[in-house]
Amino acid sequence: MEIQRLSDVVWVIPRRDPMRVPGRVFASDALIETVLQDRATVQVANVAHLRGIVEASYAMPDIHWGYGFPIGGVAATTVEDGVISPGGVGFDICCGVRLIASRFTEKDFEEQRATIMAELDRRIPRGIGKGGIAPPGLIRDILERGAAAALDAGYGWESDLERCEERGLSKGADPSRVSDKAINRGRSQIGSLGAGNHFLEVQIVDQIHDEEAARAYGLALGMVVVMIHCGSRGLGHQTCTDQLQLMGSAMRRYGIAVPDRQLACVPVRSREGEQYLGAMATASNYAWANRHILADAARHAFARAFGTSPERTGMHLVFDVAHNLAKIETHDVAGRPTELCVHRKGATRAFGPGHPELPPDLRAVGQPVLVPGSMGTASWVLRGEVGNPAFDSAAHGAGRLMSRKRAKAQQSGGEVRLRLEDDGISVRPGSVKLLSEEAPYAYKDVDAVADVCHRAKLAAKVARLRPVGVVKG
Amino acid sequence: MLLPYTVLSHTADTGIEATAASFPELLCELATGMFELMGRPQPGSADRAVTVEVDSTDNRELVVDTLSELIYQSEVEDLFFYRFDIATTGPLGVRVTATGVGNTAVELVGPPIKAVTYHDVAAVETEAGWYGRVYFDV
């Protein structure tokens, strides 16, 4: 794949027929080497074939090979005559990250480390199959009302909604668009992490790069924070599966051809497009509620460990933001405000200061952008910037560097756990054996990813977080 | 010589490819590989079986649809499948009887598979029989 340097952190894949736009990759010299190791750039070019795509097929600094879209891909299509693709969202609809502050310091954590980790281990359901915190009967209400339904059922705090993207309720949700099969998969998993790269981490704020933003987010040096990464579980996976099946035949009717069947798409303004948007928003409601409920469990775990009430833990929500969604947003295209369907597949929405959709207390500094690393390395809090060059998008993580097969061959799960414990990171895995697939060496350098985000003006550095405890799915 | 499935490398996820003498045998091999990526049933566990029928518009879709249905059945029936009896019901239809054990009676060897993708999926008849390839979201 031909790729040309545009600046020290921007690379271009020139447009070649039938690409409609060029590809544009945000990466440093070191990161671009990793990008070129797999087929991710071919996927960036494939996405550029989508009908109605504008400006470029973008790739965030954590890009790697996915299926259909690359992970870390951003594509904006016009609502008027463009398409929507479930592959541009992924199976784990509205997978995202939630960050919770606290009143505790690292010293507090060290004094209660064993108890906190034991409480989290006991309270956070994870791994294969069934078993969520919330009762299955809550599912219909959650699909209709998202995180607010979980709040009314007794989980979390009212203030959580204000700090959640879309206040934890996706516009246009239509539960009738979600199949019974999806509901069957999701009903017994409400309030569960899942597995793979999903986690709950206890972290320490170890660097502050932007005092004003950190203060607005409620973060301070040395503070204990909790980060949760998970999504819409089996309900989201089944919803995407269902919609991809439907779109296969619909594409033929609309005369749409794509270079990879996983890029299946239909016009945004079509019966099938509206159907997908309704189903996706409904699955998103499940994901907002899922993370909301898990955060509530984390508060109870800390409260129990410190012999206090959840309200006295100071565990306020910093923010909850998705990185697998397609959203209808208005952006300037060639100087004209244009309604776009912005697909972010492994990419985080990053609204800059002044954006009207931000909570009033964050509007002056911009949206928190949460970029988790691997379980042995740092995570980052960035903030959205005005003039973001990729439709208000930024990285969503470190990005995988090596396959699961290769990662497993390097060290056993037990060895990975020992190394992490040696580094002061307590690990409570769903399965020790699976730890090696998620080992720190399987991921890119998250500090380098954050650095490119900062230099490319995708999002600016606010704080760096260092892990001290991991509950792994 | 026909080979059992092999695991394909993928940066984020995982895949398998297989060859078989017939399409039902290919599906059987891919289904076996899909579950073996996740775990192994523990000896002495009680078996239970489910039977499903799947129809699709072409062989590649039939691979994805059948494996997707098995993921669904595994999750809602709380079963981990390890044996598959597959017969055709028409040119693009199959009946699958999948036998499994409870999900708690499984030794995990890999992360649960969330879904079956269409990315690079193949199901083609060759001179030697059938070749298939499929990637999973994990």
Image (tube, rainbow, N blue to C red):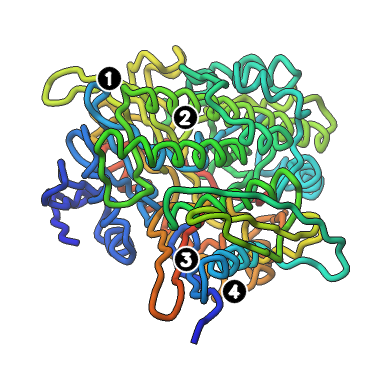
Relative to A303, is A400 on the left or the right? left
Instruction: Give me the disc on residue A330.
Output: 1
Q: Residue at x 68, y 35 (%)?
A: A184
Graded by Cα atoms within 10 Å as few (under 14), some (14 to 19) or many (20 or more), the crowding at tag 3 reads: many
**Amino acid found under the numbered disc labelled 4:** Gln
* Disc 4/disc 1 C-alpha distance (Å): 47 Å
Q: Residue at x 63, y 26 (%)?
A: A289
Percent of width and height locating residue A301: 77, 36
Q: From the viewer's side, name the closer residue of B57 and B18.
A: B57
* Disc 3/disc 4 C-alpha distance (Å): 13 Å
* Disc 3/disc 1 C-alpha distance (Å): 37 Å
Instruction: Give me the disc on residue B73.
Output: none
* Disc 4/disc 2 C-alpha distance (Å): 37 Å
Percent of width and height locating residue A179: 58, 31
Instruction: Give me the disc on residue A214.
Output: 2
Whether residue A63 is visible to the viewer of this picture, yes or no, is yes
Where disc 2 sits, the SS reads: helix
Q: Chain of mark 3?
A: A
Please state which of the two labelled residues, at mark 4 or mark 2, is closer to the viewer. Answer: 4
Q: Are marks 1 and 2 on the same chain?
A: yes
Where disc 4 sits, the SS reads: loop
Q: Are marks 4 and 1 on the same chain?
A: yes
Relative to A13, is A230 on the left or the right? right
Residue under numbered circle 4: A411
